[in-house]
Amino acid sequence: MSDRCCGTTAIEIEPFTTPQQTTPGQTGALPVVVIGAGPVGLAAAAHLAERGIDFTILEAGDRVAASVAQWGHVRVFSPWKYNVDAAARRLLEADGWTAPDGEWLPTGAELIDDYLAPLAKLFGDRVRLGVKVTAISRLGYDRVRTAGREEVPFLIRLESGEELRARAIVDASGTYTSPNVLGASGLPAHGEGAVFVDHALPDVLGADRDRYEGRHTLVVGAGHSAATTLLALAELPDTPITWAIRGGSASRTYGGGDADALPARGALGTRLRAHVESGRITLLTGFFTHRVNATDQGVEVVSRDPSGHEQSVTVDRIVSATGYRPDHSIAAELRLDLDPVLGSTRALAPLIDPNQHSCGTVPAHGVDELAHPEPGYYAVGVKSYGRAPTFLMATGYEQVRSVVSALAGDWDAARDVQLDLPETGVCSSNLAEAQEQRVGLATGISGGLLSTPLPLATATATAESGGGCCG
Ligand SMILES: Cc1cc2nc3c(=O)[nH]c(=O)nc-3n(C[C@H](O)[C@H](O)[C@H](O)COP(=O)(O)OP(=O)(O)OC[C@H]3O[C@@H](n4cnc5c(N)ncnc54)[C@H](O)[C@@H]3O)c2cc1C
């Protein structure tokens, strides 16, 4: 029994063990710092607690899982059985927690209330809320200085100016707080900073209804976040809706309708297509957002395509559903090896390439694929995927199990990465049920609206093989 890490849990916490292959010397007595108290940061903490490794979680928000809370009204597409980390489950069950129905699809709010908040409670004051990490370096070392680098602690600077030291960093700060820009070329549209743009997935039928009802709203983006928001807006009376996409047609968002191999995606697309064909939603194709201007009539949004042709629309509100990107700026003084396309590690990039993989076919991976040249720094969770929209909590949980095993010096466990996911069933969702309850379906995830459960596919990756697709 330990009250050091986990409050009243009956789990035996191993005494602190010095890792064999990580930062030795003066760093050994320092805690591991976990950045972000989302699902993956908290799972990392659960594994650290089980291994008896001292840790602190730093969370920028004023509550745990602050980013998940932002989309709390959205029902996820993977059922509970894939959303609870194994170490977290052991700690919680030892504390008397009863797991929710494994087949149920929780909303973001249920994920927090029924799982993440009780988990964080076990860690007591090891979870610090309202503390934003602004920079990470190594004590007395900038990025260039090499000799003895591995021997010195990490230095973490907080927004308040406070500085902390750590033996290792598990950066689970996510991507939700760094959305992609509206500008079509990946650069902010001219004037983008001067007008108000809503983040993806507003609670259109709930808390945010007053902001949208009766207002002409432009939704920018071609993914499921955009589709979810458009369908919700279509339920509001007297609310003009415009949908802007870069492509020449919305066929990718519509999917294959009745012929779609993925029926729920097809159903969503069919409804969206019907709204476009009936004129309820005005679709602007070939829309390359270039400039936004506040006018007396509203916000004028101007597209300029690569040939220079312009079109524009004036609206009351803009919802940007253009995806997310990782913010590596806090680690700018560390030695990172980033894939030039995705912004993940280079070793991970081919395993998560959205051109090759949906969320259910990403192979298991761990510490070897997540390691940077900077020893002891690991970006995990959705941040580790960079711009790839194929991340699942289940893969993040295996990442942190592997990384924490390595930090504990247990390299056999670290390299024994396993992931059992149905190739598409993990993304399954009962669309009708979710929509009956007037909550959006999950989004932002490639293959995120799949509904046909397929047989279990097992993926095992080793450091030697570099992993293989579970395909
Ligand atoms: C709408 C939506 C639905 C999804 N549905 C599913 C699903 O069904 N199944 C699934 O497996 N995955 C789903 N995902 C993908 C993914 O699993 C989630 O995004 C998940 O929340 C990622 O967990 P994380 O811990 O990596 O990051 P996050 O949940 O984003 O947590 C990061 C945390 O770090 C904090 N933070 C950020 N910057 C700092 C800083 N500088 N200092 C300190 N703290 C910081 C944030 O406040 C946040 O609490 C969904 C994602 C979205 C957006």
Image: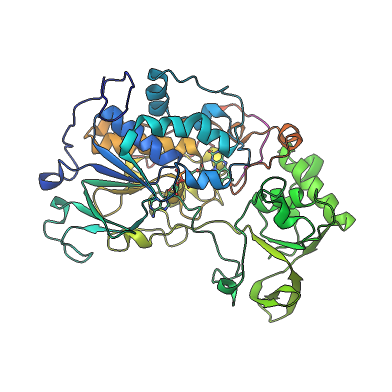
Q: 183 or 336: which is nearer to us? A: 183
| Span shown in magenta | 447-453
The location of residue 351, given as percent across then percent down, is: 46, 46
Quadrant of the frame with the N terminus: top left
The location of residue 4, given as percent across then percent down, is: 25, 29
Q: Residue at (53%, 56%) from the top-left corner? A: 324
Mark yes or no: residue 94 visible: yes
Name the side, left or right, on which 354 lies relative to 158. Answer: right
Q: Quadrant of residue 329?
A: bottom left
Q: Residue at (61%, 31%) from the top-left corner? A: 105
> Quick one: which residue is furthest to the bottom in this view?
308
Quadrant of the frame with the C terminus: top right
Which secondary structure dominates the residues rendered in magenta?
loop
Q: How many discs appear?
A: 0
Q: Quadrant of residue 86?
A: top left
Mark yes or no: residue 261 visible: no
Name the side, left or right, on which 151 lies relative to 99. Answer: left
The location of residue 81, given as percent across then percent down, is: 53, 26
Name the side, left or right, on which 111 lies relative to 1. Answer: right
> Quick one: which residue is furthest to the right in this view?
278
Residue 451 sits inside the magenta stretch: yes
Residue 418 sits inside the magenta stretch: no
